[in-house]
Image: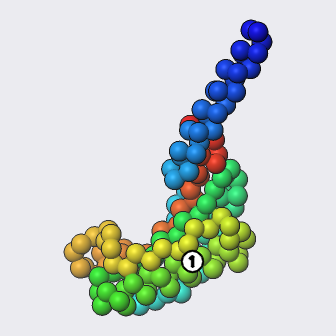
Amino acid sequence: MTEQQKRIEANKAAIAANTGRFGQLDDYYIWDEVTVLFGNGKVKVDPHYVPQLTALAEKAKTVNGYVIQVKGYASASGSSALNQKLSEDRAISVTSILLQQGHIPLTNMLAPGAMGETRQIEKDKTADNEAANRRVVVRVLQNKGIAGIM
């Protein structure tokens, strides 16, 4: 009876651990991040960012349970509608590089996010601050639940 009781307790512990993992399916660690900057009104990725993006893709492939998040932003110059479109197109441009040159499977990519002119890094509309706000932020995330990290 003691051996059977030990197995029951082990099974209960395994069930509790798996239940904890399900609770972490929306919780992530940030493993790495690259910020790609854009010119005013531009959506094409400057070629000097490509090696950084492909290196990020290679690093991601070493992370158990990884996903890549891509969020595009725009400066506050121009209309909100235009800025929303720019942020979307920028995110799609970066995502294309990750898929085509970084060979990231689509199943490991979160849908590109278009943040428009929300979450400005700098509120003052100086040229330098506006340039910092025209960006795409790419993150390698590790899902804690899938990776089994408690």
Please give left or right for residue 54 compared with residue 129 in the image. right
Residue 96 sits in which quadrant? bottom right
Q: Residue furthest left?
A: 124
* Point 57% across, 68% down: residue: 110
From this view, report whether residue 57 is shown above or below residue 95: above
Amino acid under disc 1: Val
Residue 98 percent across, percent down from the top left: 64, 73
Res. 29 visible in picture: no
* Point 64% across, 27% down: residue: 13
Rate crowding at label 1 as few (under 14), some (14 to 19) or many (20 or more) other CA atoms within 10 Å.
Answer: many
Res. 34 visible in picture: yes
The quadrant of the image that shows the C terminus is top right
Residue position marked by numbered label 1 in the rendering: 94
Q: Which residue occupies the foreground of this view, 148 or 85? A: 148
The quadrant of the image that shows the N terminus is top right
Residue 69 percent across, percent down from the top left: 54, 65
